[in-house]
Each structure stands twice: as structure tokens, then as C-alpha cells.
Image (spheres, helix red, strand yellow):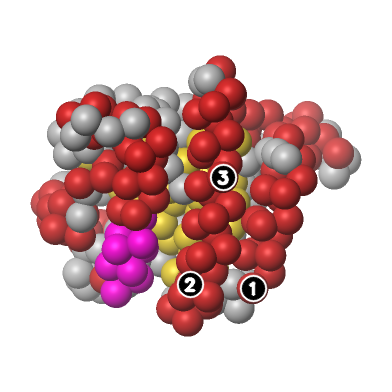
């Protein structure tokens, strides 16, 4: 599961709309984000810096995922969403796309037993019906095997687009028979791919770029943004913790 040079520290909201832990959690407990998302950017640049092929860069990106998943679960994060493959990525070369699909399938089969052991539930965000049958089969097996996980939800965004997600949610609302006046923000939220996980608190992008590239654009409306220069294959638990520390320093008001 790797990124393809995809796209909160900036806030999507205005500076004066930027939520403190005490406002977010009246109990005064540690301001840990419940839901963290990561745009895993920089595999290809990392490969070039190390004189490697793009395929080797994506493979290194896959290797970087497991320690972050384990660490996020240990820290008590309830949901971790990773941007692995966007619908726009189909424009990449056929060879690169095939490499990514092969890496995804191999990673799912290899990591599923350990995810079950850790109590991590896997969900795929995106249009699965557009994926090859072999990939859909691997995904279905992983989803089924990890369905009982209660420690953390791992959302893997694959063949994903934030705009497409909103379109799909509106179409579901219409298919459910909702009248135009009944298609509210809540009606759409309940039909998003992420409907059963907490609201997004923190969105991290690696690799130095400062954009979210069509990732969780509805969910990120009031999320904190954290950008770092570290290329994804070098992103480790210490960098993840730095993002959590920065999150704890933020004051979030949700427009209030």
C-alpha cells in the first residue's frame, strides 16, 4: 500500500477557526486525535535519491506502513486513514499502476494475520467495483478476516477521490428516496465511506508538498493540517509523534 506523489501545519478553516483539546474534550484528557489521516507522499523521490527504481521506492513505502499502523494503535488512535491510490493515479504508466496493485495485494495477504492479532479492522475507501477482480478478492478476504477488530480501524484509500466520495454519497441519498430538502449535511455524512469512524482530527502529508490532493475533502473541513518534509519511506513513529505533539498544541474552535 503506497502513495503516488499524492496530495492539516495549515488549517482548512480560517486562522480564527483553528479546536483546543479542552474544547474538543471537556474531560481534560490528553488531546490525542481520534482519527488521523496521512497522504503518503515521496516514494519516487526517495527512490531517485537512493539510486533505485520507482518500484523499489514504492516497495519501501509499503515497508513504512506497518510500524506506523502498530504505533498508531499503541498510542490509542481510533482510526488511521492512508491515501494509497487515487482515481487520478490511473493516468500513471501501466507498469507503475501494475506494480502498485501487485504491492497492494501482496501487502494485504502478508499483513492480514498480524492485523487480526492486533485487533485492527481494515476498510477500503474508494470505488472497489472499478478494481481488477484479483485485487477485489484480496481486499474482501482482508476485510472479512479483520472485521472483528475493535482496537483501531485502518482505512486504506484505494481508487479513491474525495469529490467522487461526495458524489457517491449524494447518489446513495437519492437512491434511498430522500427528497432534495432531506439531503442535509448529516444525510451526506452518514453515506460517506468514513461514516462509521470518528470525525477527522489530523491530516498529515509527507514529502514537503502543502496540499491535500482530493483526500477526505469533506472530512477535512475542520481537521488540523500537518505538513512535513520527510519522504514517506523515511516517515517513522518519531515523526508521527511530532505531528501528534503539534496537534496537542493547536487551539481548535470550529468557527466559534
Please rate how many residues cluster around mark 2, counting C-alpha atoms within 10 Å: few if below 14, some from 14 to 19, many from 20: many
Residue for point 62% across, 65% down: 142
Rendered location of residue 174, percent (x, y):
82, 35
Q: Quadrant of residue 65?
A: bottom left
Q: Is residue 58 visible?
A: yes
SS for callout 2: helix
Residues shaded magenta: 65-74
Position of residue 132 in the picture relative to residue 6 (left or right): right
Q: Nearer the viewer, mark 1 or mark 3?
A: 3
Question: Are the residues tagged 1 and 2 within 8 Å (C-beta)?
Answer: yes
Horizontal side of 16 relative to 90 (left or right) equals: left
Residue positioned most to the bottom: 117
Residue 15 in view, yes or no: no
Kindly identify which residue carries mark 3.
Answer: 102
Q: Which residue is mark 1?
A: 145
Q: Earlier in the sequence, mark 1 or mark 2?
A: 2
Residues at marks 1 and 2, CA–CA distance in whole angstroms: 9 Å
Gap between marks 1 and 3 measured at Cα: 20 Å
Circle 2 residue: 115
Task: Confirm or deny contact between disc 2 and disc 3 (CB under 8 A).
Answer: no
Q: Is residue 68 magenta?
A: yes
Residue nearer the viewer, 63 or 17: 63
Question: Which residue: 30% across, 60% down?
Answer: 68
Crowding near pointer 1: few (<14 within 10 Å), some, many (20+)? some
Amino acid at each position: 500500500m503506497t502513495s503516488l506523489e499524492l496530495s492539516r501545519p495549515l488549517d482548512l478553516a480560517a486562522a480564527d477557526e483553528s479546536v483546543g483539546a479542552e474544547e474538543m474534550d471537556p474531560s481534560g484528557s490528553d488531546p490525542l486525535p481520534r482519527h488521523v489521516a496521512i497522504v503518503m507522499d515521496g516514494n519516487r523521490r526517495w527512490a531517485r535519491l537512493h539510486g533505485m527504481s520507482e518500484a523499489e521506492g514504492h516497495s519501501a513505502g509499503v515497508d513504512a506502513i506497518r510500524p506506523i499502523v502498530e504505533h498508531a494503535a499503541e498510542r490509542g488512535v481510533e482510526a488511521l486513514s492512508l491515501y494509497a491510490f487515487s482515481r487520478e493515479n490511473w493516468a500513471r504508466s501501466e507498469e507503475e499502476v501494475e506494480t502498485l496493485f501487485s504491492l497492494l495485494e501482496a501487502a494485504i495477504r502478508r499483513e492480514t494475520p498480524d492485523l487480526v492479532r492486533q485487533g485492527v479492522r481494515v476498510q477500503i475507501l474508494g470505488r472497489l467495483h472499478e478494481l481488477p477482480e484479483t485485487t477485489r478478492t484480496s481486499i474482501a478476504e482482508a476485510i472479512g478476516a479483520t472485521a472483528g477488530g475493535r482496537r483501531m480501524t485502518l482505512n486504506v484509500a484505494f481508487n479513491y477521490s474525495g469529490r467522487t466520495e461526495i458524489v457517491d454519497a449524494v447518489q446513495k441519498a437519492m437512491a434511498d428516496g430522500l427528497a432534495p430538502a432531506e439531503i442535509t449535511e448529516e444525510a451526506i455524512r452518514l453515506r460517506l465511506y468514513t461514516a462509521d469512524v470518528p470525525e477527522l482530527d489530523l491530516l498529515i502529508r509527507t514529502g514537503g508538498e502543502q496540499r491535500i490532493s482530493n483526500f477526505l475533502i469533506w472530512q477535512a473541513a475542520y481537521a488540523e493540517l500537518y505538513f512535513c518534509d520527510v519522504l514517506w519511506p523515511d516517515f517513522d513513529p518519531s515523526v508521527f509523534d511530532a505531528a501528534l505533539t503539534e496537534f496537542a498544541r493547536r487551539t481548535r474552535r470550529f468557527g466559534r
